[in-house]
Image (cartoon, grey):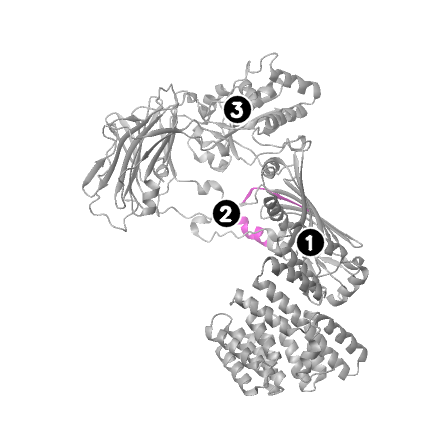
Amino acid sequence: MMRRLIFVLLASAGGAAQASDKPVYAPVPDWVKPAPPIDATALKDSDPVVLSMDTQQRLKDGQVWGYVETATRAASPQVLDAIGTIKLPWQPDKGDLIIHKVEIIRGKEHIDLIAGRDPFSVLRREEGLEQRMLSGMLTATMPVEGLRVGDVLHVAISITQKDGALGGHVQAMNGVLVDPFRIQFARVRMLWPQGDKMTWKTTAVGAVPQVSDAGGWHQVEIEMPLAKQPDMPADAPLRYRAPRLIEATNFADWQDVSKTMAPLYRTDGMIAAGSPLAAEVAKIKATETDPIKRAELALELVQGKVRYLFRGMEGGNYVPQTPAQTWSARYGDCKAKTLLLIALLRALDITAEPVLANSQLGDMVPDHLPLPGAFDHVIVHATIAGESLWLDGTSSGARLTDIHDTPPFGWVLPVRSEGAALLNIAYRPPARPDVRVDLALDERAGVGMPASFKMSAVYRGPIAQMIRAASQQASKDDLDTFATQQLSGFYGSGKVVTRTLNYDEATGEFTLAATGIAYPDWNREEERYRATLDKSVTGITFEPDRARAAWRTIPVLAGSDGNLLLRTTITLPEAGAGFTLDGDQAISNTLAGVRIDRTTRLAGDTLTVEDRVRGTRSEIAVSDIAAARARLTQAKSRVLRVAAPKDYPASWQVIDADKRARRFDALLALYAADVAARPDKAEALTDLAWFHEKIYARKEAIDDLTKAIALDPSADSFISRARIEAALGDRAKAVADLGEALKLDPGSGAADQMARLNADRGELDAALAMLDERIGAGGKQKNDYLAAKAEVLARGGKKDEAITTIDSAVTASPGNPNLLNTRCWVKGILNTALDTALKDCTRAIELGDSATAALDSRALIYFRLNQLDNALTDLNAALDLDPDLAASLFMRGVVHKRMGDVKGSAADLTAAHLLSPTVEQDYAKLGVVP
């Protein structure tokens, strides 16, 4: 915390430096303007933690002297812990750390902690090594003895800085505090000798700097915090969201910056004859004559043979190592790698120059004063046959195919001895995809069934190198998690069962291959099963808000710099017969800054979709927003989908056919492989149980759940086993399992199921007691328990109590479609008030998101009224929405038989029994029999 409070400055300068590797103790220099005194006698809990922050910088004779004074209130034990040790980092090769004051203010008492003492210890800590940074930073540390909650810690220090690389120039940047940052006093002040050719500017809106000349000094001062800065839309280009700064420099212009940096990248004599680097140059010349290919080999050499390590010590902020030093050490930062690459290219007779860049905020560079601090990176600009190549030695995995790619850096500054102006690199998407995904889904088991998949994701460039490095250190569980996270976005819901990782040195590509089980998302719409194939258009969001008057000229930054190629191959059920496509099968369009090129082919049972998705990093003018939004909306209304034939069989028919054709063997083998690979994970067994239950292998599912419970006795597993046991008619075991579930999780849905089962077993009082307890507890599920109670009462023959219960629930929530359906159903069970029952069901159909249950209930009412045609119509409608409703199939079988359709009846009753073995017994209790 103290480090953040003290270092609100970034400064560097030019000239020779004589500095100490220990703190210097000295009074506050006379050029410092005193801050208001700290009054600690009347502090309140509502006062800010940071009471004062004063930042002053003197720019003189090529040196930046930065003075920082802070007062921080130890408002709580947490703040006390945070400020209880002072940590002051500085770079001794650039200047001195000067300690002026460290004191505790306690009421009126000032306790001097440095008088006659040297309480600071100096540590060399390369804290950035994990980020591959060697800064040469020293840290002076001091535990603040005697500091208490309520005290104020008052610190004043200076850091002087000179940087010989800048040729006598200076630069300074400071952040500006703005509301809602809370502080009693804050100031930033800069001063330099009158007559010096210094320029300054601030990007803070509403700042009113006090500019004055006194005693031979020109000074600029801003008191803070400033008023809240104007809000900016999150999708605005970065230049509109620039940090609030004040800057000062004596660089005349960008040409001056360019000329100043140029001597640092001279390469004359840098590759000595007979040296190892000369041998590398000779090897490249002997291998290739094409300049483009030579440039690529040089780039591969720098990227692949020299690891990255930032070197900020010994003048290294701007001064690169020599190529010989870099090659010998086999490490270097962007400066060192750039100089090495330039030396190699020039030795290969290729024109090359360094280019300063900002790796993250290139869009903001023109808004800065001309100063090197506007940049944090340097790359190579090579010119071959009139074409510009932008080569980054710190990147990785580059190959010949990629050499024409442009970096997403925006504004850059070429470094030339004659100087240069800023240059904007026009972005174009990379030639190769960053990620290339091939997904093969085998959906021959049928619509709504799991599908086995094989897929590979091939990564290139820096991301490939990052994954490669991480994979060499990660555990098996970490790699499994990584594989799932990387691939699940492509196959959707499902699981990875096996995976392999491989790095190809020749191509610089990292491949993640996997097999697994996917659960394709088929939905029934307009009497057909449909699945969305599109994974590109649906993923684009474009919701710019330019309603505010101040935002109406701010463009939208649209489209990232990602580049993806996704090929999906689906083997369809039923040899593809009757399957059709709708939506955009071919796309060649830019939507909200994202370029999409698509081809689609359906031949026999094979469906192939290939999408190339590339971000354009484009800006969309406000005047073009409406048109861009309309194009995207139109595209989203035509997303690519596949539709099964209208007469596609119900799942129970598909499952029966699959079993006979042994189409489940491959899926069962994958589930078994998952169990074998994770013998200690109950999840693998519960997944297998789910599949066994889905294909009506209920006894096998119970065995799977029994094994899962032995590993992890969860409420969900007990509830699942109880459901299957009840379906097989073993209600006693089901009740026992539900009891175990309730012990583990009293708030689970087991109570509803258990109450219904107890009622079916004749234990009506126990069922009602369980439901009344949950109804009395209230909460979101109260209506569900009321509905369950009404049905239990109805099945128990308690007509008046059942009607009273459901009536009171509907009165309390008159527009609840589930309660209306329950009242209709209860009346159907009791065969009473059938006229009002019809109204309830019809109202539930009108109000509900899904009409399936209410249609099934209304069919029972029509059946009771002997209106068999109406009953059949509703049952057909319900089964059109969900062809696997056992209750509706059973009732339709009964209706068919009453209407004389013996064959249709037999088919429906067989299907209903397959889906729910106890369905006939359940309806017999209602007096409904075939």
Q: Is residue 826 left or right of residue 903?
A: left
**Which amino acid, mark 2?**
Asp
Residue 425 image-quadrant placement: top right
Q: Are marks 2 and 1 in contact (CB under 8 Å)?
A: no
Report if residue 218 is visible in the image: yes
**Which amino acid, mark 1?**
Ile
* Element under disc 1: strand
The circle on residue 909 is: none
Identify the residue position indicated by label 1 in the image.
Answer: 517
* Element under disc 3: helix
Q: Nearer the viewer, residue 340 or 18?
A: 18
**Is the residue 470 above or below the residue 355 in the image?**
below
91 is within the stretch colored magenta = no
Q: Position of residue 776 (x, y in %)?
A: 46, 75
Identify the residue position indicated by label 3 in the image.
Answer: 336
Residue 82 image-quadrant placement: top left
- Measure the alpha-carbon separation of dots 2 and 3: 35 Å
Q: Earlier in the sequence, mark 2 or mark 1?
A: 2
Q: Is residue 676 left or right of residue 268?
A: right
Q: Are marks 1 and 3 in contact (CB under 8 Å)?
A: no
**Which amino acid, mark 3?**
Ala
**Is the residue 379 above or below the residue 821 in the image?**
above
The nearer-to-camera label among 1 and 3 is 1
Q: Position of residue 540 (x, y in %)?
A: 59, 51
Report if residue 226 is visible in the image: no
Query: Around disc 1, counting alpha carbons within 10 Å, would you say few (fewer than 14), some (14 to 19), or many (20 or more)?
Result: many
In the image, farthest residue toward the top: 273
Residue 138 image-quadrant placement: top left
- Start-end of magenta stretch: 611-630
The residue drawn where x is 54% and y is 25% is 331
